[in-house]
């Protein structure tokens, strides 16, 4: 349809910095220290962008330095599609099997940031590993 683009959100994202091991690909995250598998910025920071007709005019062409996690996209896409992001099947499974518990959905809604309504990250902190939090 002619208006499909008006309701389209295009997301380009990565889950981590590039690998700096020669055995995999020998990428570069310069000027950031570290790479994939490390807790340094080069291992956890990555570029992302959003585009499409869904974006309000006031945010098109702008830059945001808001901290987000790749898991936030699940919750955000669910809300955009009018789908409840809560995992009721995991809750039911946890009631039936107590030895191993499935974690709750921990992604947060990025729509206020995408729309330029809020410029503050919804995260208080982001666990990076057993040794580091952001």
Image (spheres, helix red, strand yellow):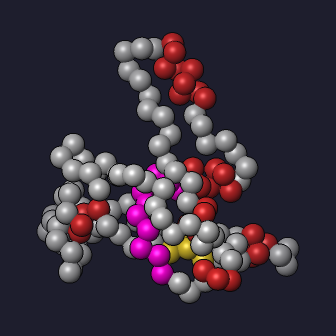
Residue 117: image x %, image y %? 61, 69
Query: Left or right of 54: which side holds 90?
Result: left
Q: Nearer the viewer, residue 48 or 117?
A: 117
Q: Residue at x 61, y 61 (%)?
A: 111
Q: Residue furthest bottom?
A: 61
Residue drawn 24% across and 47% down?
129
| Residue 64 is a magenta residue | yes
In the shown orientation, is residue 46 left or right of residue 74? left
Comparing 15 with 132, the one in front is: 132
User: Is there any visible trace of residue 115 in the rendered image?
Assistant: yes
Q: Where is the C terminus found, in terms of image quarters? A: bottom left
Image coords of residue 59 (percent x, y): 60, 80
Residue, x 45% and y 72% (percent of image)? Answer: 48
Magenta stretch contains residue 54: no
Decide: is 43 above or below 75.
below
In the rendered image, which quarter contains the N terminus?
Answer: bottom right
Q: Is residue 15 left or right of residue 11?
A: left
The image quarter in which residue 17 lies: bottom left
The magenta-colored residue range is 63-73
Residue 110 location, quadrant:
bottom right
Asked if residue 58 is positioned above or below residue 100 in the image, the reply reads below
Determine the main secondary structure of the stretch shown in magenta.
loop
Compare residues 25 and 63 and report the one nearer the observer.
Answer: 63
Please determine whether, in this image, residue 5 is positioned above or below residue 123.
Answer: below
């Amino acid at each position: 349809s002619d208006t499909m683009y008006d309701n389209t959100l295009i997301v380009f994202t990565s889950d981590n910095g590039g690998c700096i091991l020669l055995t995999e690909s020998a990428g570069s995250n310069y000027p950031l220290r570290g790479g994939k598998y490390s807790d340094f910025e080069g291992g956890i920071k990555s570029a992302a962008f959003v585009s499409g007709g869904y974006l309000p005019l006031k945010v098109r062409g702008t830059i945001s330095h808001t901290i987000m996690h790749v898991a936030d996209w699940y919750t955000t896409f669910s809300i955009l599609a009018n789908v409840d992001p809560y995992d009721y099947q995991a809750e039911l499974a946890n009631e039936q099997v107590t030895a191993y518990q499935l974690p709750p959905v921990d992604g947060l809604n990025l729509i206020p940031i995408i729309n330029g309504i809020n410029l503050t990250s919804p995260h208080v902190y982001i666990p990076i590993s057993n040794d580091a939090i952001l």
